[in-house]
Image: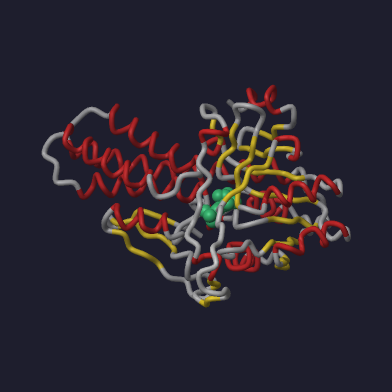
Amino acid sequence: MRTIWWEDNKVILINQQKLPNSLEYIECTAYQRVATAIKTLEIRGAPAIGVAAAMGIALAAYQSQAQSTNQLRKEINIAAQAIQETRPTARNLFWAIERMLQRAQSIQGTPATVRQEMIREANTIAEEDIEINKTMGNYGAALLEDGDVIGTICNAGWLATAGEYGTALGVIKVAHQQGKNLSVIAMETRPVLQGARLTAFELSQDNISVQVICDGALGYCISQGLIDKFICGADRIVAKDGCHVINKVGTHTASIVAQYYGIPFYVAAPISTFDFNQSLQQITIEEREADEVTHIMGHSIMPNNVPVLNPAFDITPPELVTAIITEKGIIYPPYEKNIHQVQ
Ligand code: MRU
């Protein structure tokens, strides 16, 4: 249950565009291929693309013919720049790149030493991600009760991380392992259906009961008392002015409906998703290609030449978030004050 790993000096990743119909792997022998995989959603989910960025940089270092450490660092910077341009919103991508570049700068020694260290650091980031999600799952599981039906959006499971648990689905999995009888209502998550394709796949593999709804059915399901709690992941939590949660488009709508009908709205995210430096205005919400909306699984569903809007993420303000589950504990409002517990 790993989404991405380093093997025989290559980066191997599950091609998530092919799931659930087939389980295929991509072998990357150049960092550019890792960058393409991030861009095209062959690997996706904030923590997973952070790990992919780190592995891509390690691959660039491994492949470099540089004879001096300075030259190697220059080539690592070029790869980092290219990987940074793949997707703009998930904080984890930038967090992982910054960590790799800091390590490349601080390590002294020959190019061979730096190359080895880059591979070691990328593997460490992946291992840590799995441990962090397990810890987060343990904290979050306390919020779930036997019999709960949990709503979720997109895929915030092991496929969205280095592997094993996931963030929001990690919380559900740990509670399930503790013996709580839970079931999930997963929003299909148009346009590219991470909920219908990936969350449904993951939860059924784990024998956790799951039903998929089309996104527009969420309000009805909550109004009818069919969902007790909502949990999602995050791509970036802007922590400068309260905690604004940037996550898959549709999350904000879910948070409004949850508050209207009085059900808790939880977010599960590691500290590497938090942005402590930039303001909301400085963040780019990714706009993706129109064909994700005009087509479903390669089939055109719209008249030609009708324009579409395709923002990949939206912003949920802190007043709609009941609590944020992290590996350092659960943060409750007021977030401006309580954020210091995890900073
Ligand atoms: O466009 P995606 O599939 O990369 O979007 C992913 C999400 O929105 C997830 O909810 C988020 O990254 C958290 S995953 C642990």
Residue 298 is situated, as x and y percent measured from the top left of the image, at 49, 75
Residue 8 is situated, as x and y percent measured from the top left of the image, at 28, 57
Quadrant housing residue 191: bottom right
Residue 166 visible in the displayed image: no
| Image point (32%, 41%), residue name | 81
User: From the viewer's perspective, is 58 left or right of 201?
Assistant: left
| Image point (52%, 65%), residue name | 292
Pick the front one: 47 or 208: 47
Residue 255 is situated, as x and y percent measured from the top left of the image, at 74, 47
Quarter of the image where the C terminus is located: top right
Residue 166 is situated, as x and y percent measured from the top left of the image, at 58, 51
| Image point (23%, 35%), residue name | 73
- Residue with the most extreme left position: 67
Pick the front one: 3 or 19: 19
> In the rendered view, would you say 158 is above or below 127?
below
User: From the viewer's perspective, is 171 left or right of 158?
Assistant: right
